[in-house]
Image: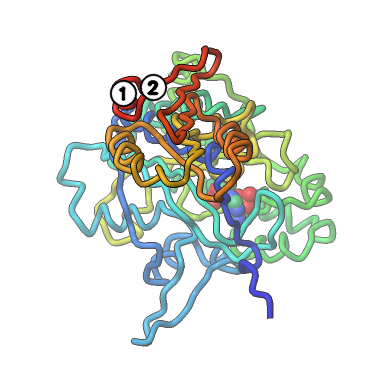
Amino acid sequence: MKIEAPRGTLDVLPAQQPAREAVIHAAESAAVDFGYRRIGTPTFEDTALFARTSGSGSDVVQKEMYTFEDRGGRSLTLRPEATAPIARAYLEHGLHREAQPVKTFLIGPMFRYSAPQKGRYREFWQLNFEAMGSADPAVDAELIQLFTEIARRAGVGYTRLALNSIGDRDCRPAYVERLREFLAARVGDLDEDARRKLDTSPLRVFDSKNRDVQRTLADAPTIGDSLCATCAEHFASVRAFLDAYGVEYELAPTLVRGLDYYTRTVFEFVNEGLDAAQSTICAGGRYDYLIEELGGPPTPGVGWAAGIERMVLSREGKAKPSAVEIFFAVDEPARRAEILPLVARLRASGRPTDLDYGGRSLKGQLTQAERSGAEIVVIVRAEGATIRRRGEQDHEASLAELERLL
Ligand code: ATP
Ligand code: MG
């Protein structure tokens, strides 16, 4: 029997790493420049953490969780997202006692049992940036600008940033009721998924990827007209700060998020060059009630998550592959042992060095050197050696001189 990678998972082969590393490096370097510190949480959590926070009507809880019982009979779930785990850690370790907001980032794998397609996997990686403990609209704007900066550094293109506010406890319920009435009157135009959401969380019908449902929604009431004064003011400030940063956005009155804990600001970076159902590369928003729902004190928060695979698909230009700098082609096999100490010293001093292992002819080894991208090829002969630098004349040297000349 041939064993292959599990359905929906991804091998990231060496040739694909440079593009991925460009994204991760951009995120890590921007994190430093923006004052976000790395946080790590387990890849599995108590199932209740996600069931409680995501909302029982959400896609994630309904259909996508990898839930299992461990040998001790506990129900555990491979994390489908990182915000709830970070909020749990924030509470569990009393981070609300540190200076607020606590700005963190996490880069790691997430797991969702969804139908695999290009840009949609069962194990995928996310960049996650969160700021907990501040309701200041300038934090929302900072996080959004932070993603634009990561995208710039990583060469990731997107076509638009969609922005909306979905209100809070004061203004959302009345709106949700109006929406429910609107949808209930058009139940014949909804698909099964939308009908189910109509009962549990009508706002999420906006999340539908079904075109017919989207058409029905075109005339639906939007939350924007129903925001209370404080939410409207908060949203206006977020927009003013984005303008100050020079970040362009489109108002998207029907944009909602798939999870229950979002309030006020919600946003998405979309790359229309990707398949429509997988075109969102980064999504986030404010979640002012999340920590409270976990049993903590009222603590506002805001953050986003971006799919690394989708960012890689959205990269423009080629990533520079990591290359060796010095390649040793050994024309006289008997002398191989003599150069190994030098190879080890070069590597120890941070000079990427490689040599041939195939027992190839000199010609074959030089082809190998060329493929490796090496700047310098050293041809070790029975007597002495030749140093061949790209674009320069060959230089003859004794083995003793080699180290000084490299
Ligand atoms: P979608 O609507 O595409 O299912 P979502 O609303 O479920 O996305 P979030 O939970 O907001 O996504 O996750 C944030 C980002 O993580 C997404 O914008 C996307 O880039 C990425 N992402 C989410 N699910 C997957 C997946 N199954 N495979 C790859 N990337 C994913
Ligand atoms: Mg999803």
The residue closer to the viewer here, 116 or 46, is: 116
Residue drawn at x 39%, y 56% as measured from the top left = 84
Q: Identify the image quadrant of the C terminus.
A: top left
Residue type, numbered disc 1? Glu
Residue bearing mark 1: 401
The residue carrying pointer 1 sits among few (fewer than 14), some (14 to 19) or many (20 or more) residues within 10 Å by Cα, namely few
Percent of width and height locating residue 355: 47, 41
Left or right: residue 42 compared with residue 81: left
Q: Are marks 2 and 1 in contact (CB under 8 Å)?
A: yes
User: In x, y percent, where is residue 138?
Assistant: 37, 25
Q: Which residue is tagged 2? A: 397
- Residue drawn at x 58%, y 50% is 13
- Label 1 CB less than 8 angstroms from ligand 1: no
Q: Amino acid at mark 2?
A: Ala
Q: Residue furthest left?
A: 97
Q: Is residue 55 visible?
A: yes
Provide the secondary structure element on which disc 2 rests.
strand
- 140 in relation to 118, above or below: above
